[in-house]
Amino acid sequence: MSEDTTIKTEVVEEVKKQPELILEEIPPSIFNYPTVYPLMQTLAKEMADASLGEYTLQDTMLCIKFNPSILYYAYVVPDKEVYLGFDHTRRVTDPKIEREFAGYALVTFNGNAPPHIWQAAIIPKYYHTNVLDNGFKALLKDLVGKFQPKEITMSALREGWEDKAKGMGFKSTFTVYRKKIENT
């Protein structure tokens, strides 16, 4: 009678967490930290350049620092619980905390007008992902929770946003066209 020496191995599949999207409010008090402003600078400059002179990068920076507005950064993080376990200022400013900048949104306020999503941009790496959709859902949820507005408005510079905005429930109300006039 031979003894069974087979070692029984139980296969356990490793469960890998998917990266998660975090929408983080960036207060003006930490905006100028060396690890915070540079993240959005390129995207904000591209948007200002695309505005054909409607505004400049400096206008965007002044709005963030001095106007009634809220700046949000979107980060992709490997583990939401670990990320959120850090103090807000530290998790936004500490380069050692694992996160990847995915984009930003700038919401402005003007008197009694509804909150206005003035700028929203994501880095090209995330163009064909659900980052934009998930980011907008989180942004709208946050704005509704904070302000209980009857409406939220949004402007966009790039082609293709009309379909995206309609898909999120926005209705087109105003369009600005521009024609450059050559000096004669």
Image (tube, grey):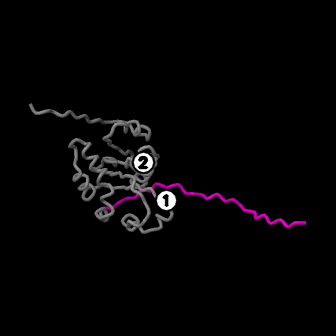
Percent x, y of residue 81: 51, 63
Magenta stretch: includes residue 129:
no
Q: Quadrant of residue 26?
A: bottom left
Magenta stretch: includes residue 8:
yes
From what the image shows, is residue 88 above or below residue 105? below
| Residue drawn at the location 28% of the way across and 47% of the way down | 46
Residue type at the position of mark 2: Tyr
Q: Dot 1: what SS? A: loop
The residue indicated by pointer 1 is: 78
Residue type at the position of mark 1: Pro
User: In the shown orientation, is residue 3 left or right of residue 7?
Assistant: right
Q: Which residues are magenta?
A: 1-27
- Total marks placed: 2
| Residue drawn at the location 32% of the way across and 40% of the way down | 158
The quarter of the rendered structure image containing the N terminus is bottom right
| Residue drawn at the location 25% of the way across and 55% of the way down | 61
The residue indicated by pointer 2 is: 126
